[in-house]
Image (tube, rainbow, N blue to C red):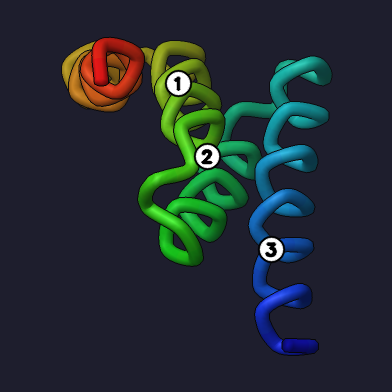
Amino acid sequence: MVSCLLFRVMRYSYSNRALCYINLLRYAPGEKDADKSISLDPLFVKSWLRRGICRMGLKRPQQAYFDLLRVSFSALV
């Protein structure tokens, strides 16, 4: 039970820190944190959104497109 709680906290922590980096316009470390959050839970949509925003900020629109496309598909389900 404790490991499950720790898993959820880590997922949220990395995703929230990615959002902080986005607000500071520091997209490279934000992308790394979003990647870590996605690796912990690939179904956590906010991490995909934040990684897409970071990739847009890093001038990689093609990679960002696929992240944001995943977000839009999950909204339909």
Mark 1 and mark 2 in contact (Cβ < 8 Å)?
Answer: yes
Q: Residue 73 is drawn in which quadrant?
A: top left
x, y percent for residue 39:
42, 63
In the image, what residue type sits under mark 2? Answer: Glu
Foreground residue among 44 and 33: 44
Which numbered mark, 3 or 1, is in the foreground of this view?
3
Other residues around mark 2 within 10 Å, as few (<14) / some (14–19) / many (≥20): many
Foreground residue among 57 and 38: 38
Which numbered mark, 2 or 1, is in the foreground of this view?
2
Mark 3 and mark 2 in contact (Cβ < 8 Å)?
Answer: no
| Residue beneath disc 3 | 8
In the image, what residue type sits under mark 1? Answer: Leu
Residue at 76%, 30% in the rendered image: 21
| Residue beneath disc 1 | 58
Q: Is residue 68 above or below residue 45?
A: above
Residue at 48%, 42% in the rendered image: 44
Residue at 49%, 16% in the rendered image: 53
Foreground residue among 77 and 66: 77
In the structure shown, which secondary structural element does the residue marked by tag 3 occupy? helix
x, y percent for residue 3:
70, 88
Which numbered mark, 2 or 3, is in the foreground of this view?
3
Rounded to the nearest angstrom, the CA distance separating label 2 from label 3 is 19 Å
Task: Locate the C terminus and report the quarter of the image it occupies.
Answer: top left
| Residue beneath disc 2 | 31
x, y percent for residue 38:
45, 52
Q: Is residue 18 above or below residue 26?
A: below
The answer to whether residue 64 is left or right of residue 41 is left
